[in-house]
Image: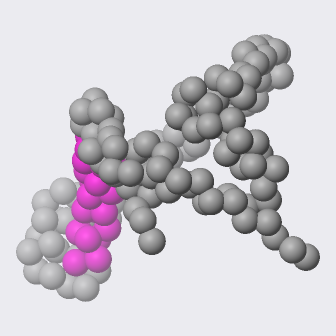
Amino acid sequence: MKAYIINAPQLQSIQKRLGGFFSWLLCWAMWIYLLVPLVTLTSWVLGDKKMINEMRWFGGYKSLLELLQIYLISLLVMAGLWLIWIIYRSLLTRVVKKRPYPTVSNADLCEFFQVNQRELQNCQEAQLMTVFYDEQGHIVQLENNIINN
């Protein structure tokens, strides 16, 4: 089976690759930031002497309760902001009418994808179609299949 075009990173621009890398890095940093207190708490509960001393140094379980309170408030604020964003976006899509997309003719499609009119017509009538690409992401072959029930 040929590789899908979406799995061809050489076809992405450098900005998209850098953006994806920094998003990946930010997400992993957030996960590590959220997991470090759980590792510390687990070590403390299991009786690690270094962690017990560290927990005493920072105020013991009382400071843990304060931190849990701060975490809970932070999570509630983030959930509230997320819900506000969802409500805002749903209201925005109801109020603002979507602009209709410009009509594209079959000739425009044939020119853009570099296929002939007959192949395009066959593909539009097919129930199942397979598209094969070359290494640069250009269409090489169209294969039409009709499903018989």
Name the magenta segment's main secondary structure.
helix
Q: Nearer the viewer, residue 123 or 96?
A: 123
User: At x 62% / y 31%, what residue is drawn?
Assistant: 110
107 is within the stretch colored magenta:
no
Q: Quadrant of residue 81?
A: top right
Identify the image quadrant of residue 137.
top left
Identify whether 56 is placed above or below 47: above
Q: 143 or 56, which is in the foreground?
A: 143
**Residue 61 sits in quarter:** bottom left
From the top left corner, tell me how far across and down residue 28 is, in percent: 29, 54
Quadrant placement of the N terminus? bottom left
Residue at 72% across, 49% down:
123
**Residue 149 vs residue 116: left or right?**
right
Q: Residue furthest right?
A: 149
What residue span does the magenta drawing correspond to? 20-43
30 vs 84: above or below: below
Asked which colour scheme the image uses, the reply is one colour
8 or 129: nearer the viewer: 129
Q: Position of residue 135 (x, y in %)?
A: 33, 50
Is there any visible trace of residue 73 in the rendered image? no
Query: With 60 as the anchor, is 53 left or right in this view?
Result: left
Q: Position of residue 146 (x, y in %)?
A: 79, 66
**Foreground residue, 49 or 139?**
139
- Determine whether 121 is above or below 142 in the image: above
Q: Residue at x 25, y 85 (%)?
A: 46
Give the quarter of the figure containing the C terminus.
bottom right
Residue 36 within the segment the image draws in magenta: yes
Instruction: Give the left or right position of residue 7, taking residue 82 as reference.
Output: left
